[in-house]
Image: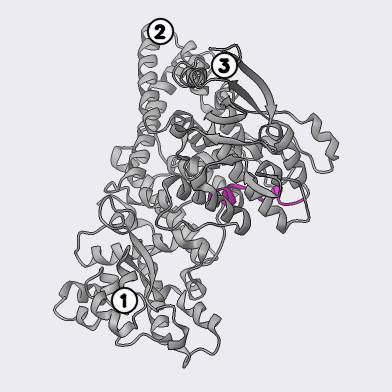
Amino acid sequence: MSKLENKIEARHRNLFDVLNEQKYTVDYFQREYSWGEKHIEALVTDLTSAFLSEYTPGDKREQGEDYNNYYLGPFVVSSKDGKRSIIDGQQRLTSLTLFLIYLNNLQKELPFQEKIEPMIFSELRGSKSFNITVEERIPCLEGLFNQGEYVPDDSADESTRNMAERYQDIEKAFPEELKNDAFPFFIDWLRYNVIMVEIIAYSDENAYTIFETMNDRGLNLTPSEMLKGFMLSRFDSTEKRKQANDFWKQAMLELKAYDKDEDQRFFQSWLRARYAESIRPGKAGSKNEDFEKIGTRFHSWVRDNLSKVGLDADSGDSFEQFVQHEFRFYYKAYLRILDAEKALVPGLEHVFYISRWGIAPTLSLPLMLAALNSHDSQDTVAHKINTVAAYIETFVVRRSVNFRNFSASSIRYTMYSLVKEIRGKDLPELQRLLGQKLEGMHESFEGMKHFRWHGQNRRFVKFLLARMTAWCEQQAGMSSSFVTYYQPASGKPFEVEHIWADKFSRHQDEFEQEHEFHHYRNRLGDLVLLPRGTNQSYGDQPYEQKKAHYIKENLLVKSLCPLAYENNPNFLKLKTALNLPFQPHDTFIKADIEARHDLYRMICERIWPETLVGTEVS
């Protein structure tokens, strides 16, 4: 190996130096982009919170040089023949690229013209290319950069689909208080105060060795380990300290089996749910409070707030009780939530639903833990968690059908106030309180009369139709579930399809303008779920011909057909018992879409009522 190949460099670089007109490829074994909503939300929240703790309205741009830096961690590149390949760190760098694309699009709506583009792509001899180059991701990045959205087709890989969804999560997580005069200050801070350590190896062998060392043998103490050290140091009994240490280590292993950062997410959620008293007001220049401090340095926050946590600095017994009873109880409850997010668990179904369409995890997880008391039975724990999850689901569905935002930045103060309101409530009081919150919402299902499908609400429309379809079939005694229609483990996935073919010429007796036709065609009443590929085979046919195919599909689709009302006692019982205006449609014109739209609204009112008493475990 030559001297150059044997060389390894490490240097402190701000984000501007890392990305501005720089070029990286991604090593083949790092190709998949796998971040989920909770990862991207944590990144955006951490960065924006760190900036807001430094910024004060009225600052001059040059004062930003005195703002504290934010360390984002290391990344490893292999440099050969003038080309650099990312060996470790592409998840963060790809996410930062998505974030920068969002910021660049956002500023088009604001009176600013910050030079963000060179950190996204660079230009050589008139040819533009993205700074982080993976060939199959280029259409997605181009769509996000040029249109602010990207709709993956059937051939898109999982990384591309993830990137498109994470971009939407960034939109939800970015705080409103930065969409004003603070925006250029934030861009400055992001460029020059966010720091990474670049580790460069000049041979693949050395690069992979560094990658393995960082991922397999890192010795840095995590916040969870520092909290453990502090807690266990206060125990009076050596034997009890050993028992607590064994339990703590096992708990951390179980949490990390879900995600490498799940242990930290648990402590943040638990401490916010039960002990945090304050949150930063939603205006620029405000300082971080309990909620934010727990999110960044929860181990330090506990040490500095013993009385809030109910700990007595002079009593080892209080620390033992906290670890062996409180910690153990909430840790087990948290595992139940994690399991219910992964698969439909009887009695915790709403947890699964809101993991597909809900509020940000930094808000939903504390909410679901807040009402629990450490003496609650396991049934009561499930009742309370499911009740809160049902409230969250109803809240987001009603906001969504009214085209109302529920991004973390827009509802964080309201939701954290709710955390404190429901903290420790018994089940009847919890149901009563959350029911009152739903009754007081401005958004109701009456607003559905304006709801329609468009490019940016595809995920929600599929969620909505999957919930309605599964609910109707369950009420009719069938064994299908939400998973059947939203994300089946096998078989063809279901897709949102229009009943009307995209043929304006067939409807000119009802519409003078083509845009009016498309407006009606995208109303919810014209939409159903069909297996992928099914509608393509007869999608251009008139409705009168489609009916023969629809009778073979799910119950909500079948209900269009007169034949579904013959010799189908369970369906007719559902129609009568729940007073739902199901009706067959011999033809499907404008009035039929309106009738189906009303039917869907009434189904939604049955699925998501204002009362939450029905959320108990049966």
Residue sitting at the far left:
567
The residues colored magenta run 169-180
Distance of mark 3 from mark 2, alpha carbons? 54 Å
- Decide which of 12, 343 is in the foreground and name it: 12
Query: Upstream in the sequence, badge 3 or badge 2?
Result: 3
Q: Which residue corresponds to the image point at 62% horizontal and 38% vertical from the top-left? A: 278
Query: What residue is shown with label 1?
Result: 580
Q: Nearer the viewer, residue 116 or 401?
A: 116
Element under disc 2: loop
| Circle 2: residue type | Ser
Q: To which residue does mark 3 refer?
A: 5
Count neighbours of disc 1 (C-alpha within 10 A) and say few if under 14, some if 14 to 19, many if 20 or more. some
Q: Residue furthest top?
A: 238
Residue 517 position, x and y percent, is 50, 82
Q: Is residue 124 above or below residue 453?
A: above
Element on which disc 1 rests: loop
In the image, which is nearer the foreground, mark 3 or mark 1? 3
> Along the line of sight, which residue is nearer the eye, 597 or 378?
597
Within the magenta stretch, is there residue 170?
yes
How many angstroms separate mark 3 from mark 1 (CA)?
Answer: 73 Å
Query: In the image, what residue type sits under mark 3?
Result: Glu
Q: Secondary structure at mark 3?
A: loop
